[in-house]
Image (tube, rainbow, N blue to C red):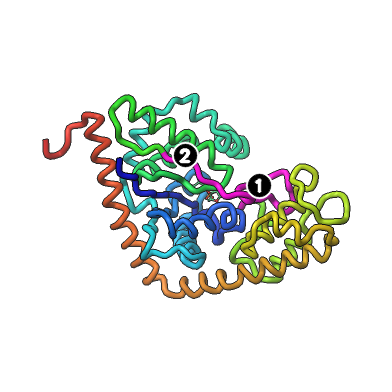
Amino acid sequence: MAEQAKRVLSGIQPTMDSFHIGNWFGALNQWVDLQETHECYYCVVDLHALTVNHDPKQIKQRTLASFAQLLALGIDPNRSVVFVQSHLAEHSQLAWVLSCIAGYGEAARMTQFKDKSQKEGADRATVGLFTYPVLQAADILLYQPTAVPVGDDQKQHIELTRDLAQRFNSTYGQTFTIPQTMTVVGNSRVLDLQDPTAKMSKSSPSGAVFLMDSASVISKKIKSAVTDSGREVSYDFEEKPGISNLIGLLAAATKRPIEETAEAVSGQGYGSFKQLVADELVACIEPIRDRTSQLLEDPSELTALIARGATKAGVTARQTLNMTYQRLGLLGPGN
Ligand code: TYM
């Protein structure tokens, strides 16, 4: 049997002016590397950003800034299909179909929904927040990827996607490729610098280093990162999550394996170790911040690239949606 082309799809929300290093080291790093071996589809998921309070004045700029950051990080729009979710109606169309085979109970079990709806309060949590993972499943299945590169926190959503694809295929006939979850070793869950029991996230700005942070802000955040009891550096996620997290960041910033990095810094005092982590992070983030700012100076060039991405993505998305409608037995416009 001919080997299936290896294809990945992934997405990121434009909810802030800047991605953080959890996004970068947990997911985007592998997006960049996968361009060597896979056909890649990468998507800025602006419709997902509507599930929590959003500001209409900001989302356009944040979508552009997200796109610029992806390019600055090394996503090449000539090699990968990079696009904006809302430019393709097929995402919402397939989401509706999938929501008709998704169980209410299985959607209610998604931990991200439970966490976010608790924070928003039951009355304020929207139906969109509830069906969020179904839209994510549509984002994925439209492009028939063999794998989805994400951080740890997305694993449950990819499991749901697989379940929905399998259910659809067994009910209506082979339609969707069943994708694998693909996570990085070591940094698939980057921790909050102020609270190493939680993942780094945009909702805790002092615990996250953003790609658009200045050198002095980055240094300050690393130096005030919560460390663990003891005085010497060693890699032990159970006993020393704060320090181990910083070792993971150092490894990613210097592009060296975690084990090798851990060995090199083992026994150092916390002060000099944090200084090293701060310096290396500043060194790798600064060029990305500068490149992003440069790209944002010419939005028309970015908009042209985004339009090209939508055209390319549309070919695959329409094929899958047409096949899905046929399998469902819907009357097509021509017959
Ligand atoms: P989002 O926008 O929250 O995050 C984008 C990517 O960054 C990863 N990530 C992390 N990885 C390690 N440590 C962290 N602290 C950390 N924080 C974030 C996320 O796992 C993700 O891979 N639901 C998705 C967006 C989405 C999507 C998709 C993803 C929509 N459709 C289709 C894949 C395929 C989300 O909110 O990611």
Near-viewer residue (211 or 204): 211
19 in relation to 171, above or below: below
| Residues packed near mark 2 inside 10 Å, few (<14), some (14 to 19) or many (20 plus) | many
> Residue flagged by tag 1: what amino acid is it?
Lys
- Predominant secondary structure in magenta? loop
> Residue flagged by tag 2: what amino acid is it?
Tyr
Q: Residue 199 carries which label?
A: 1
Q: Residue 132 carries which label?
A: 2
Residue 326 visible (yes or no)? yes
Residue displayed at 44% across by 25% down: 103
Image quarter for residue 98?
top left
Residue displayed at 67% across by 55% down: 258
Report the number of discs.
2
61 in relation to 324, above or below: below
Q: Does the residue labelled 2 lie within 8 Å of ligand 1?
A: yes
The span from disc 1 to disc 2 (Cα, nearest Å) is 20 Å
Residue displayed at 51% across by 65% down: 73
Near-viewer residue (111 or 300): 111
Query: Could you tell me residue 72's position as x and y percent?
Result: 50, 67
Near-viewer residue (222 or 7): 7
Query: Could you tell me residue 33's position as x and y percent?
Result: 49, 59
Is-magenta flag for residue 198? yes
Write down the region rendered in magenta.
179-203
The answer to whether residue 218 is left or right of residue 107 is: right
The answer to whether residue 317 is left or right of residue 161 is: left
Residue displayed at 77% across by 47% down: 236
Q: Is mark 1 within 8 Å of ligand 1?
A: yes
Query: Could you tell me residue 133's position as x and y percent?
Result: 47, 38
